[in-house]
Image: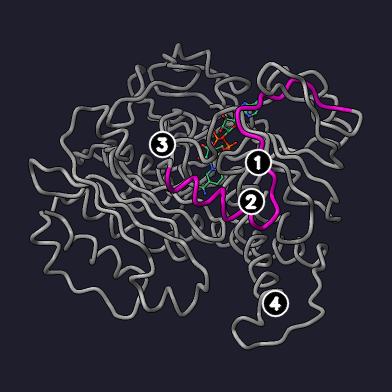
Amino acid sequence: MELFDLIVLGGGPGGYNAAERAAHGGLKTLLIEKRALGGVCLNEGCIPSKSLLYSAKVFDYCNHSDVYGVACAGATIDQKKVVERKNGVVKMLVSGIGAKMKKAGVKVVAAMGTIQGRDADGFKVEADGEVYCGKQMLICAGSEAVVPPIPGLREGLADGFVMTNREVLDLDAIPEKLVVIGGGVIGLEMASYYNSVGSKVTVVEMMDKIAGPTDREISNILMNNYAKKGIEFRLGCKVTEVGNGKVTFEENGELKSVEADKVLCAIGRRAVTTGYGLETLNVELERGAIKTDEFMKTNVAGLYAAGDVNGKVMLAHTAYREGEVAINNILGKKDRMRYDAIPSVIYTNPEVGCVGETEESAKAKGLDVEVVKMSMMQSGRYIAENPGGDGIVKVIVDKKYHRVLGVHMIANYAAEIIYGAAIMIETETTIDNLKEIIFPHPTVCEVVREALFEVK
Ligand code: NAI
């Protein structure tokens, strides 16, 4: 039986990054992945959706090029080519991770790993007929799409009428009518893509707003942008049945339905904690996910968990950092996971980028805050590139310590700008010190600087 310092179970962003860091830190490391390296993010999430959305953006530019003085009449979209291009992007990145693991000296086993228990030597994991032993173990088993017991949903998934985040990225024909259940991140990004390429899209959302915990003013701007582009939003509507070419939902106590050629079910994800022998370790769970502390430790000595499987913040970049925290602690370096400056992005057009407290969440915590709001029209570059744009940025400032607690913006490039705001929060830099930082001109990010000068 081969003995490792560390076994990492699951090769998504949490797992592969942690395995590489562990190997660089001198640990003999084994990474076990049953599907493809890169996990959901790379194979059926973040990356493929960005490839599709970029194709849609190019198509949108073609269809609205006149305003820029460019004529592109007769643009068409070739869905098969869009998907082929996406597959090429994914393939390149997956093989890149394989090469990284090899270079770092991580042993990769491409098979289902099943935990068999733990003894004095360490954790025993069976994969591909072999049993491996790890002195310590990091679980990065990820999450799966929630499929609630809505009548017709499971049958729909089986016959292809209903899709999850996986199938929706591989459609070889554009559905005429697409109904998206859930106005969260996945629902909105895919609604955006299929709206751009010509589907009639309806988003059915249970809450009274889209985009989950996103600042309400920003989610309203986003919704208005997409309503203008033709997406129909049915808010406050709970889906009750799916099938026979339609989605039925309850609106104000009344049953209504909307026709669909395809349905995307995007109503959240849950941690994967069964099917791989986790129960042999008596791991403590919390709301269906592995309970971890700030060092990513579980209740079992030597056992760590990072990424979606701990159910804290289900984002790839959270997983990266959690994996790093786990490895640093395993290597004896003090490191602690902090969750108050994790940026989140919605890759719609316009993009949404948020980090830290919203006005609502800050007030709920009893914090005394000042909210500075600024139109993106303060940016010359924004005006030049976004005719008719209605983007904004909101900066939430702690009055007591005179520092930034949150930044929320809707405008293209927000995804690339928001990390700067995360640095402002994480480093607890005062507004006066931030004002001394020089931003490039002309850029969209300058509006964040302008907003800082408005703080009292
Ligand atoms: P989500 O939790 O973001 O949104 C699900 C939505 O479905 C909620 O708004 C909820 O109110 C609604 N809903 C639930 N049951 C419903 C029902 N019966 N009828 C109508 N609406 C219903 O989940 P989503 O979009 O599936 O995303 C899953 C995870 O993937 C999230 O944790 C997200 O952060 C992550 N993700 C992140 C991306 C990014 O960072 N850009 C992109 C895609 C996914």
Give whichever of 192, 393 is nearer the camera: 393
Q: Quadrant of residue 260?
A: top right
Question: Which amino acid, mark 1?
Answer: Phe
The answer to whether residue 241 of the structure is visible from this angle is: yes
The answer to whether residue 127 of the structure is visible from this angle is: no
- The percent position of residue 220, horizontal first and vertical second, equals 50, 46
- The percent position of residue 399, horizontal first and vertical second, equals 11, 43
Q: Residue at x 46, y 15 (%)?
A: 281
Residue 233's disc number: 1
Q: Mark 1 or mark 3: which comes first in sequence?
A: 3
Q: In whole angstroms, how far apart are the C-alphas of marks 1 and 3?
A: 48 Å
Question: Which amino acid, mark 3?
Answer: Leu
Asked if residue 278 is positioned above or below residue 127 in the image, the reply reads above
Give whichever of 37, 226 is nearer the camera: 226
Residue 227's disc number: 2
Circle 2 — which element? Answer: helix
- Say whether mark 2 is within 8 Å of ligand 1: no
Q: In whole angstroms, how far apart are the C-alphas of marks 3 and 2?
A: 50 Å
Question: Which residue is at the far right?
Answer: 244
Q: Mark 4 or mark 1: which comes first in sequence?
A: 4
Give whichever of 18, 440 is nearer the camera: 440
Q: Mark 3 or mark 2: which comes first in sequence?
A: 3
Asked if labels 1 and 2 touch by Cβ distance under 8 angstroms, the answer is: yes
Chain part drawn in magenta: 217-243
Question: Which amino acid, mark 4?
Answer: Cys
Q: Residues within 10 Å of mark 4 (few under 14, many from 20)?
A: some
